[in-house]
Amino acid sequence: MGNVNLDLIVGPLGEWPAEGTETLVRTARWRVGGNAGNAALACAGLGTAAHTLSPVGRDLGGEWLRAQLPPDTVTWWEVDGPTSLSVAVTHPSGERSFITQLGHLGTLSWADLAPRLGPARITLLAGAFFTPALRPDYPRLIAARRADGGAVALDPGWPDGGFTPQVRAEVLGWLPGVDHLLINEAEGLALSGEADPRPALAALAALLAPGGVAALKCGARGVLARRQGCAEVHELAAPTVRVIDTVGAGDTWNAAYLHAVLRGEALDTALRFAVEVASRAVSTDPRVFV
């Protein structure tokens, strides 16, 4: 559950156009987007027994979005206003920039979710900073999921305005109820306050639920992970691939990792599977997960 929205991906764009000018790009495509949306799409591609909860706007974008995922894998409810849209601009370096209109995501709340929650072995909370009405209730949501006997996975994304001291304190306060912290390297450094990924990993893992796993996704370099209460650092390199589109790579990684965890795989095996799936996804068009 989290930010399921529309993505319009355009590029590549070498330089931002000056005001009042127009620039042509080579590609443009519509896709399910958002941290939670990308994970839901990957789960559908992997055949994971996963279910997504999300509002959607009463508009053409909402109709299109609902048609992209198998209907039995999502519980949708319509809300007034537009469906959220992110414009993802790709750059020749492979990096991308996002411009997001909040739309329906601004309505997602604990009151919406509570009556729709069913049993789950793992609940993935994705894109906290794009669900502002739900965000204050994250402690209640995490506690409710754990009370139901399930594990909690967290990928909050990057906050608008960065990891200020107040935002850091808020997110760090969630971690004692989190079993799988799945964030990228830049987020890990900013959240921990460390300048190097290994100390950042150690600091974050120490705050998780007993036996929890902290993973730092490092793009083309692969992933670093560490289990709470254990000094061993697991490091998995990524294969060399021809990158086509990196949008949603980390969210695809999350889905693949949790897919492997649900199968009972060991940590190294789950990490390797996630790296392989994400690498395949960013190097295929249309995307292939398996």
Image (cartoon, rainbow, N blue to C red):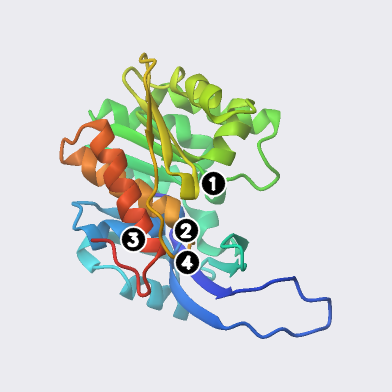
Does label 3 or label 4 sit earlier along the sequence? 4
Q: Is residue 15 above or below residue 192?
A: below
Label 3, secondary structure: give it: helix
Does label 1 or label 2 sit earlier along the sequence? 2
Q: Is residue 18 visible?
A: yes
Q: Quadrant of residue 23?
A: bottom right
217 left or right of 132 in image: left
Who's the residue at 40% across and 59% down the image? 37
For marks 1 and 2, give the one nearer the viewer: 2
41 left or right of 19 in image: left
- The answer to the question of whether label 4 and label 2 lie on touching residues, with beta carbons closer than 8 A, is no
Q: CA distance from mark 1 to mark 2?
A: 17 Å
Q: Position of residue 121 (x, y in %)?
A: 21, 37
Name the residue type under label 1. Answer: Ala
Q: Is residue 59 visible?
A: no
Name the residue type under label 2. Answer: Gly
283 left or right of 43 in image: right
Label disc, if present, on residue 34 of the rendered structure: 2
Q: Position of residue 102 (x, y in %)?
A: 58, 60
- Dot 4 corresponds to which residue? 245
Quadrant where the C terminus sits is bottom left
Does label 2 or label 3 sit earlier along the sequence? 2
Label 2, secondary structure: give it: loop
Label 4, secondary structure: give it: loop
Q: CA distance from mark 2 to mark 3?
A: 19 Å
- Dot 3 corresponds to which residue? 280
- Dot 1 corresponds to which residue? 133
